[in-house]
């Protein structure tokens, strides 16, 4: 389009920009030398062609500029700026890479940058309003997250969950493993919340949820809780994502309630865990210290089970997994959960899971062997198997980028994004 201004003509174009995120950082790209805006930094994207939606344009541009495939998330903001040669109407969206390795076809270099460091870079004028929007969003993130903490009374216990994303969106329920809590998902929930109403539950005996007295931590106890939460919140056509024990609960629920689950993601545990698994947890029950002299002791314990996880992520997890009393630090889960890990056996139920299913295995997991993972995927009617490289049992902590790409790619392939 050409617009008249002060007796001269200039073009107005609509462009898109991608806010690609990874571990709290955002991708920025430097324009090539010889370009009108040479050496300026920007959020990558490009001109919307005739007949394109902004989302289609952004996927095409990132494929052409970097050789990557992305899913486009929520709208970030809009910027209008008149350069001497063109007026730009820029629309920015969050995006997540789901496949492909970065190749630089149109830029001099790319960097992953924390928003707090944006001031170190010379951004193009059209991108500066987006910079400000992202900085304002970073400042308000903690308050927004805290405001979504919810509690619900179920079977005499007070269960806590964290909720993110639009209440009107498709629900996605996240279920952690033994000894974990809702914060184990903190690295992926911001990405999921761009598309879904994310409900991350502290299962009974974990996190800030109530402890059962006398101890009641069998499969049936957890399943009754999950059914009650789903019914009370009115969740329909939902996606279930579970890790370890939480994966067993998610898969069993999907088998027993096929009409309520749109997709299932089962992470790193056999459908019939071998007896050594139970014995290992019983050993922890007998031998784990009651408390720690400092959070660092607990972080070292986490690091032994998540050898590839970044230390700052484990520090954040520890901050949400310990309470201090009289100078000592205590775990926020009931020790009795370790002694009462049930004899799970989902093998007879797998054929009843009718929804699309992603089975995830950490490539170096000792909990979910390669053969067991392949057999499970074959037993499910509509399943695919993905291994996450540089990951052990907690694949979502060891390799959060690879885990996120696997999850988002699966959901995109099945039209759920």
Image (cartoon, grey):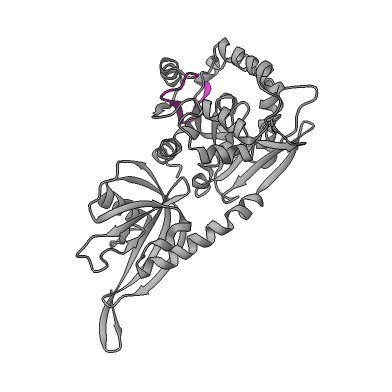
Camera-side residue: 53 or 21? 21
Camera-side residue: 386 or 54? 386
What residue sits 63% from the left and 40% below the top? 319
Judge left or right: residue 361 versus residue 87.
Answer: right
Judge left or right: residue 385 versus residue 108.
Answer: right
x and y percentages locating residue 27 in the rendered image: 38, 52
Camera-side residue: 305 or 340? 305
- In this rendering, the answer to whether 244 lies above or below 417 is above
x and y percentages locating residue 387 in the rendered image: 40, 27
x and y percentages locating residue 197 in the rendered image: 57, 46
Q: Is residue 208 in view?
A: no
Q: Is residue 370 in view?
A: yes
Q: Residue furthest left?
A: 34
Judge left or right: residue 37 versus residue 287.
Answer: left
Residue 377, magenta (yes or no):
no
Residue 357, magenta (yes or no):
yes
Quarter where residue 278 is shown: top right
Q: Point out the stretch of residues depicted in magenta.
A: 352-367
């Amino acid at each position: 389009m050409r617009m008249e201004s002060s007796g001269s003509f200039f073009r107005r174009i609509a462009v898109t920009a991608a806010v690609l995120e990874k571990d709290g950082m955002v991708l920025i790209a430097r324009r090539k030398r010889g370009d009108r805006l040479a050496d300026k930094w920007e959020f990558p994207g490009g001109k919307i062609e005739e007949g394109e939606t902004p989302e289609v344009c952004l996927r095409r541009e990132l494929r052409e500029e970097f050789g990557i495939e992305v899913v486009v998330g929520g709208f970030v903001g809009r910027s209008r700026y008149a350069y001497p040669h063109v007026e730009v109407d820029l629309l920015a969206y969050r995006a997540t890479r789901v496949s492909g390795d970065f190749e630089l076809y149109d830029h001099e270099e790319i960097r992953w940058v924390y928003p707090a460091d944006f001031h170190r870079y010379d951004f193009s004028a059209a991108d500066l309003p987006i910079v400000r929007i992202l900085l304002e969003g970073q400042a308000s993130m903690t308050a927004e997250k805290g405001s979504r903490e919810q509690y619900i009374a179920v079977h005499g216990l007070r269960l806590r969950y964290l909720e993110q994303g639009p209440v009107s969106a498709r629900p996605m329920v996240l279920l952690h493993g033994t000894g974990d809590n809702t914060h184990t998902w903190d690295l992926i929930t911001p990405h999921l919340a761009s598309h879904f109403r994310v409900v991350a539950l502290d299962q009974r005996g974990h996190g800030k949820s109530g402890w059962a007295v006398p101890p009641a931590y069998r499969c049936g106890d957890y399943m009754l809780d999950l059914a009650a939460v789903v019914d009370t919140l009115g969740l329909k056509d939902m996606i279930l994502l579970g890790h370890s024990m939480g994966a067993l609960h998610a898969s069993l629920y999907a088998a027993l309630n096929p009409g309520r689950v749109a997709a299932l993601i089962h992470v790193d545990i056999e459908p019939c865990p071998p007896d050594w698994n139970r014995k290992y947890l019983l050993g922890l029950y007998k031998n784990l210290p009651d408390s720690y002299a400092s959070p660092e002791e607990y972080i070292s314990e986490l690091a032994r089970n998540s050898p590839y996880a970044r230390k700052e992520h484990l520090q954040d997890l520890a901050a949400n997994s310990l309470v201090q009393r009289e100078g000592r630090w205590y775990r926020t889960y009931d020790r009795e959960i370790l002694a009462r890990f049930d004899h799970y056996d989902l093998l007879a139920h797998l054929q009843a899971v009718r929804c699309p299913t992603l089975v995830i295995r950490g490539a170096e997991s000792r909990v979910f062997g390669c053969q067991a993972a392949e057999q499970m995927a074959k037993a499910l009617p509509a399943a695919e198997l993905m291994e996450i490289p540089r990951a052990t049992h907690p694949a979502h902590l060891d390799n959060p980028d690879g885990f996120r790409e696997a999850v988002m790619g699966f959901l995109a392939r099945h039209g759920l994004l």
